[in-house]
Amino acid sequence: MTTPATRLFNGSHFQVKEFILMGLPGIHSWQHWLSLPLAVLYLSSISANLLIFITIWKELKLHQPMYQFLSVLSIVDIGLATTIMPKILTIFWFDAKAISLPECFAQIYAIHCFVSMESGIFLCMAFDRYVAICHPLRYPTIVTDSSVFKATIFMVLRNGLLVIPVPVLAAQRDYCSSNEIDHCLCSNLGVTSLSCDDRKLNSICQMIVASLIMGGDLILIILSYALIVSSVLKLNSVEAASKALSTCSSHLILILFFYTVIVVLFVTHLAEKKYPLIPVLFNVLHNIIPPALNPIVYAFRTQDLRLGFQKLILPGKKSK
């Protein structure tokens, strides 16, 4: 007798037709209490990123490459948070743990695409700061509205196409036994661990994709900032050097957080069998905290953005 989660496959064994997302390992009985802080993080992420996008769009003073890239980052953050949080909240609130195979593979694709897109936008922002500081006289001719648009389209195409093999290979696996995933979302390695055949190709593919995209982006970001620091150290004025570096501070904070969490995720994944909750929790937080953190960092450290918020929220109040 088959369960609702299985169907007859090749007349000899069963192939699951849906997965069951069990939630956070080891704390299933009280994980619903985490729904409130996660819901607050999600709502704050959506509202803050929408506020940044609308402010940059309406305020002519913010129609600059740095802020245009920030507006693209806001859309990416909204997409990333929305890819996972509604499903997680329905699991915690309504015990709606079932997810169909196509939905699960689509979520794998969307997560990889948005995370890679965030890495790509960080690279674009690093290049913008490099040109602004190292080649200030050529900046208006190099970093134009057209180049921002082309860079954004390139990143969309690069990430949208390069991550396709990850969910495609996952969909080709044979899922014929357990369909319960000890996770809140469909992670590639979590899903393929349920397959009855060899998943080595999936692991290799994910490693190659991550190395090409995020590894390549990180190397170019480090190179950009090495050249920025080298250029700043040549300035005779301490004040000028401080001012130049201050324009990079918000970007550096976000980059350090983004890539540090990825490294922590990789390390904790190695200890998954001993402490299964830690990598799952970090995986969830990595997909929701950056979208909530990015607007806060830029809002607190960028005066032009704060003035734009003030004009949008309090249109009758004059800025000092």
Image: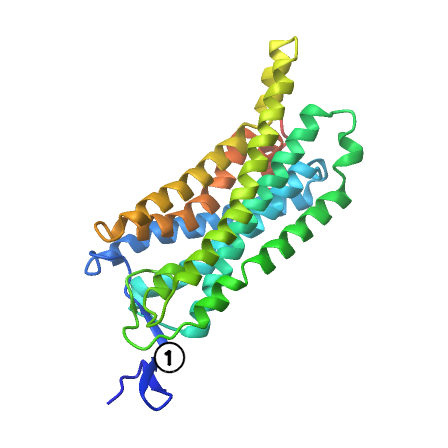
* Quadrant including the C terminus: top right
Can the viewer see residue 49 in this picture? no
Give the residue drawn at x 37%, y 67%: 198
Give the residue drawn at x 71%, y 39%: 63
Can the viewer see residue 91 in this picture? yes
Q: Position of residue 16 (x, y in %)?
A: 34, 78
Asked if 230 appears above or below 211 in the picture, the reply is above
Front residue of 64/278: it is: 278
Q: How is colour applied across the structure in the image?
A: rainbow
Q: Is residue 243 left or right of residue 267?
A: right
For the residue marked with disc 1, what is the amino acid?
Answer: Lys
Q: Residue 175 appears in which quarter of the rendering? A: bottom left
Asked if 289 appears above or below 136 in the picture, the reply is below
Q: Is residue 84 left or right of residue 2?
A: right
Front residue of 188/207: it is: 207
Give the residue drawn at x 59%, y 44%: 121
Front residue of 103/300: it is: 103
Asked if 135 appears above or below 111 in the picture, the reply is above
Q: Position of residue 101 (x, y in %)?
A: 42, 74
Mark 1 Cα shell of 10 Å, populated few (<14), some (14-19), many (≥20): some
* Quadrant including the N terminus: bottom left
Number of marks: 1
Element under disc 1: loop
Give the residue drawn at x 50%, y 36%: 255
Q: Position of residue 213 (x, y in %)?
A: 55, 48
Please, which residue is most extreme toward the top here? Answer: 236
Please, which residue is most extreme toward the right here? Answer: 141
Q: Position of residue 284 (x, y in %)?
A: 37, 52
Name the residue that disc number 1 marks. 17
Front residue of 307/3: it is: 3
